Image (cartoon, rainbow, N blue to C red):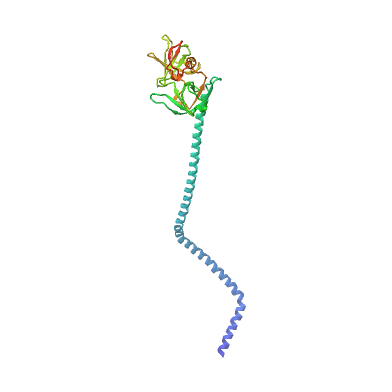
Amino acid sequence: MKQRVGSVSVAVAARNWTQRFAFVLLILLSFGIMLVGKADTVVVSRARTLLIDLIAPVMEAASRPIASAKEAAGTVQELVALKQENARLAQENQTLLEWQSIGRELQSQNAALRDLLKFTPDPRASYVTAPVIADASSSYVRSLIVLAGQNDGVVKGQAAITGAGLVGRVLEVGKRASRVLLLTDISARVPVVVERTRDQAVLSGNNSDSPELQYLPRDVDIKVGDRIVTSGVGGNFPVGLPVGEVMRVADGHILVQLYAQLDRMEYIRLVDYSLPGILMQDLGIDTSQATDVTSPALGKLPRAQ
């Protein structure tokens, strides 16, 4: 009983002491907590720094594959974009090449047509401008195929000219195409005149690029550079069509360089001068079957072609 009373007395005394010094104790506790918190902040900071130092290499090692994967993904995207851009540029380049080809073709056609306009036929003559579609020349024949025929008003015997001058005559006519016999063909014969001396002759093809002047007077004074034009004899071509100029006089042979570049022709003008020809008009025979022409000025001449 006495022991229980003693315990109660101690408890009462402790409570009274606590109540009296509670404020002081709280102040001391607060300071203590503050000191412990400060100490904990330093410790935690040091521990955090140490932990970061320990984890940094691991995090770096772990981040490398991710960075590599991102870089690889970026590279793939760039490659895909570059492939698409390359395909687009290739398509644009192909389109530009096609337009360039069309432009060059149009430029070439324009140049050829403008060159053709340099020579103006007689206003009374009718003509057809036809593109050259094939070179039918061989070792024995010099001719061209043009895309114009009977449907376009082309008839046999019409003069074939370019802007530079005479190139031949229409030899065969189909419905939509015709064959032109060139002046260089071995069977081609055209009555011509030397413009400077007015000497008449016959331009004879020899299957080379330079036909020859024949049937000239013996005392003729022919010089290199003399201009050769059609004489109108025979009635197949009018007077004065430009043909070429003398390029060489040697060993009794007089070679003529044609004004027209036969290997570069793209368009030819087929002109109908409405000249029936001397044989057709006077003798009533087909000039395509004739073998010679008789002229007082030239004597007996080969048929003009």
Q: Give the position of the N terminus as an image quadrant.
A: bottom right
- Left or right: 37 with respect to 137? right
Q: Give the position of the C terminus as an image quadrant.
A: top left
In the rendering, at what x and y percent does residue 151 appear?
51, 28
In the rendering, at what x and y percent does residue 22 appear?
61, 76
Which residue of the protein is positioned furthest toward the front in this rendering?
284
Which residue of the protein is positioned furthest toward the left in this rendering?
251
Answer with the quarter of the image where residue 289 lies: top left
Name above or below for residue 75 compared with residue 179.
Answer: below
Residue plotted at (54% across, 22% down):
126
* In front of the other: 248 or 148: 148
Q: How many marks?
A: 0
In the rendering, at what x and y percent does residue 281 appear?
49, 16
* In front of the other: 224 or 158: 158
Name above or below for residue 233 compared with residue 11.
Answer: above
Which residue of the protein is positioned furthest toward the top in this rendering?
219
In the rendering, at what x and y percent does residue 17 appear?
60, 80
Name above or below for residue 97 compared with residue 160.
Answer: below
Residue plotted at (44% across, 29% down):
134
Residue plotted at (59% across, 73% down):
26
Name above or below for residue 208 compared with residue 89.
Answer: above
Residue plotted at (48% across, 48% down):
80
Which residue of the protein is positioned furthest toward the bottom in this rendering?
1
Answer with the quarter of the image where residue 190 lies: top left
